[in-house]
Image (cartoon, rainbow, N blue to C red):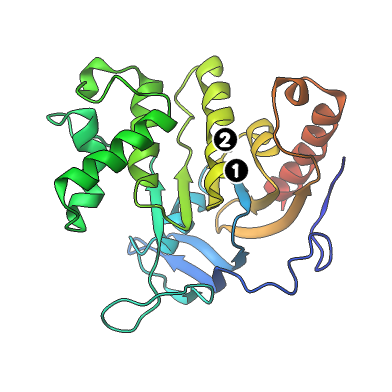
Amino acid sequence: MALAQETGTATGRAAKKPLVSVRSLSKKFSNGTLALRDVDLDLFPGEFVSLLGPSGCGKSTLLRLISDLSQPSAGTIDWPGADSADAYGRPEHSLGFVFQEPTLLPWAQTLDNVTLPLRLKKMNRTEADQRAAAMLELVGLKGFEKSYPRELSGGMKMRVSIARALVTEPKVLLMDEPFAALDEITRHKLNDDLLMLWQRNRFTAVFVTHSVFESVYLSERIVVMAARPGRVMSELIVDAPFPRDNLFRTSPEYAHLCRLGSDALKKAIDA
């Protein structure tokens, strides 16, 4: 196993068409803060990528730009790998977003929270309920379809949020530190469940984290970002097989990979 700098031949992706292509992306807010500067990043179909960096390096901003929740000040975000278009002929952005907080509707039951994006797409109620129930079973919440958010633990709320993001079968799943507020045991379990879902559905996963340990455990590729203005300092490949489990998490190889990741993060912070 090794953690190495990305090269064009390191993973064989050089000949593949990216699903999302970010070029010379910059974001300056109205108060003058330059959050991102000249970010280049390709996201390929079916890969798991972590964005690793200190607070304020623009990781969350980058996710919001990719998801069209915010607009760049300069640069482009293209979807060359999109295979469908909207009513205006623009590439269709097939994505789900899991935020730092579960952002559930407090007055809605679990099933209704998960069916929300399907109902916004005008799917009939029976089909929406069936798809949502199947997704809740996948995330381990079968039997909680009629529970309200106030009746769920923090980890269970995040599972509902993940189910809601995946129920539309997106090609890209964006996750903005979804497990940061959870205890370590719950966080480890959700890491394992997330990898299971990713291996099952093979969406492109983009996971924001401050944790070297989490990024090494989850990822095929780690994009290390420097502090404000955010920019990509290095891309690292985690050469470890899937599925990963607690044996990997406690192995000397994992500890070695984490040390190498920590060194890369320190260089980015000092840049």
- Mark 2 residue element: helix
Q: Is residue 119 visible?
A: yes
* Proximity of marks 1 and 2: CB atoms separated by less than 8 Å: yes
Q: What residue is drawn where x is 45% and y is 35%?
A: 178
Please state the horizontal and vertical placement of residue 42, each as a whole percent of the image. 61, 67
Please state the horizontal and vertical placement of residue 4, each as a whole percent of the image. 84, 50
Sort mark 2 into few (<14), some (14-19) or many (20+) by Cα contacts within 10 Å: some
Q: Write down the quadrant of residue 255 in the picture.
A: top right
Q: What residue is drawn where x is 36% and y is 77%?
A: 85
Image: 16 above or below 141: below
Sort mark 1 into few (<14), some (14-19) or many (20+) by Cα contacts within 10 Å: some
In the orientation shown, which residue stands out farthest toward the bottom? 89
Q: Is residue 206 left or right of residue 98?
A: right
Q: Write down the quadrant of residue 30 in the picture.
A: bottom left
In the orientation shown, which residue stands out farthest toward the left? 107
Q: Is residue 30 left or right of residue 191?
A: left
Please state the horizontal and vertical placement of residue 100, each as a whole percent of the image. 40, 37
Q: Tag 2: residue type? A: Met
- Mark 1 residue element: helix
- Number of numbered labels in the structure image: 2
Residue placed under numbered mark 2 in the picture: 196
Checking the image for residue 199, the label placed there is: 1
Q: What residue is drawn where x is 39% and y is 60%?
A: 67
Q: Tag 1: residue type? A: Gln
Classify the position of the N terminus by image quarter.
top right
Q: CA distance from mark 1 to mark 2?
A: 5 Å
Please state the horizontal and vertical placement of residue 186, each as a whole percent of the image. 50, 18
Q: Is residue 171 left or right of residue 233?
A: left
Checking the image for residue 270, the label placed there is: none
